Image (cartoon, grey):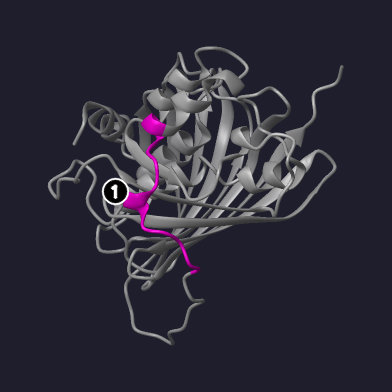
């Protein structure tokens, strides 16, 4: 486990300041606001801290309301909507400077048997055959809007080993292609079973954190845009939904298969499926984001 991963785990280990009120630290992202995946993961940790450990989350639905201030802590208030025999529902509001910045609803379920089927895992190369971020980003530093962008991207992803199957959007600017993207990812090191956040909640929250990193890439690919890093679009997450189907481990390779069915009205939709290396469909993700072309 490297220092960046330890720092990320510390970021997710919220301070309980009242029975259902938690406080989390913030840190700067590659853009001048709190990374959306951080807020979503922290909110899910807050919700999960009020639910028995043997009842993991099976879905979440969230809205990003305002940009988060990386220089201030975030307070998470949990509303215990329902505690049923099989399902538990929680609502979380994240507040900074007296204003809500994020809203999440999450549902948790006791494990049970049921009907079983899934889509097959799409083909993808072995992740160990693909370049790491540390190998890829310096190669393309001249493409970025500012000289320090590659360094900021490396720092932001230092806790996660994330490897693109095909060229990322910032490499193929001006070359529209099929709106599909794949990345393999896992944490930079093995996770401890005695973490402050019990497993499987920890694994699910880490996957939630990563799920916001690349989901809108497929929108950019369809139009030959490189994203904020090259300055040809302005973007931000609007809402985010996830369904957790099967067990996973965030410290083992996971394939994030992503596509975009539509973009319009300054917004774009991204859909993702996360598979284990063994081919199990573990998570489904849908996100809508603002995608605007700068004027002038």
As helix, strand or loop, the secondary structure at mark 1 comes to helix
Picture quadrant where residue 143 is located? top right
- Seen as rendered, the residue at the extreme bottom is 115
Above or below — where is 100 with respect to 152?
Answer: below
Question: Is residue 90 shown above or below 226?
Answer: below
Frontmost residue, 258 versus 173: 173
* 55 left or right of 230 in image: left
Q: Residue pushed farthest left?
A: 194
Above or below residue 13? Residue 122 is below
Q: Is residue 83 visible?
A: no
Residue 174 x %, y %: 75, 35
Residue 204 in percent (x, y) is at 36, 53
- Residue that appears at 53% across and 26% down: 140
- Residue at x 46% of width, y 62% of height: 124
Q: Which residue occupies 25% across, 57% down? A: 53
Number of numbered discs on residues? 1
* Left or right position of 16 against 42: left
Quick one: label 1, few (<14), some, or many (20+) residues within 10 Å? many
Which residue is denoted by mark 1 in the rendering? Answer: 202
Q: Is residue 128 magenta?
A: yes
- Against 70, residue 76 (above or below) is below
Residue 237 on image: x %, y %: 63, 38
Residue 68 in view here: yes
**Image quarter of the C terminus:** top right
Q: Quadrant of residue 216?
A: top right
Magenta stretch holds residue 127: yes
Q: Nearer the viewer, residue 39 or 136?
A: 136
User: At which x and y percent is residue 49?
Assistant: 30, 47
Q: Could you tell me which quadrant the N terminus lies in?
A: top left
Q: Residue at x 14, y 50 (%)?
A: 193
The magenta-colored residue range is 122-135
């Amino acid at each position: 486990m490297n220092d960046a991963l330890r720092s990320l785990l510390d970021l997710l280990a919220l301070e309980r300041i009242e029975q259902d009120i938690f406080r989390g630290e913030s840190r700067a992202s590659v853009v001048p606001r709190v990374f959306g995946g951080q807020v979503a993961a922290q909110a899910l940790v807050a919700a999960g801290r009020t639910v028995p450990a043997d009842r993991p989350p099976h879905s979440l639905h969230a809205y990003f309301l305002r940009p988060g201030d990386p220089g201030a802590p975030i307070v998470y208030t949990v509303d215990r909507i329902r505690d049923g025999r099989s399902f538990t529902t929680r609502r979380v509001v994240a507040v900074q400077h007296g204003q809500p910045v994020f809203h999440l609803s999450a549902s948790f379920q006791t494990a049970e048997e049921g009907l079983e089927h899934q889509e097959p895992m799409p083909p993808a190369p072995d992740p160990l055959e693909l370049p790491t971020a540390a190998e890829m980003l310096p190669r393309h530093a001249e493409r970025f809007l500012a000289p320090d962008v590659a360094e900021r991207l490396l720092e932001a992803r230092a806790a996660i080993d994330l490897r693109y199957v095909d060229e990322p959007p910032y490499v193929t600017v001006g070359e529209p292609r099929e709106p599909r993207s794949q990345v393999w990812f896992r944490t930079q090191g093995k996770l401890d079973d005695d973490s402050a956040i019990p497993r499987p909640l920890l694994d699910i929250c880490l996957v939630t954190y990563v799920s916001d990193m690349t989901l809108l890439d497929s929108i950019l690919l369809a139009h030959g845009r490189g994203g904020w890093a090259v300055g040809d679009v302005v973007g931000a997450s609007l809402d985010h939904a996830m369904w957790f189907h099967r067990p996973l481990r965030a410290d083992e390779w996971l394939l994030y298969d992503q596509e975009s069915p539509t973009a319009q009205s300054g917004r774009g939709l991204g859909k993702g499926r996360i598979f284990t290396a063994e081919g199990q469909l573990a998570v489904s993700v849908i996100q809508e984001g603002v995608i605007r072309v700068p004027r002038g």
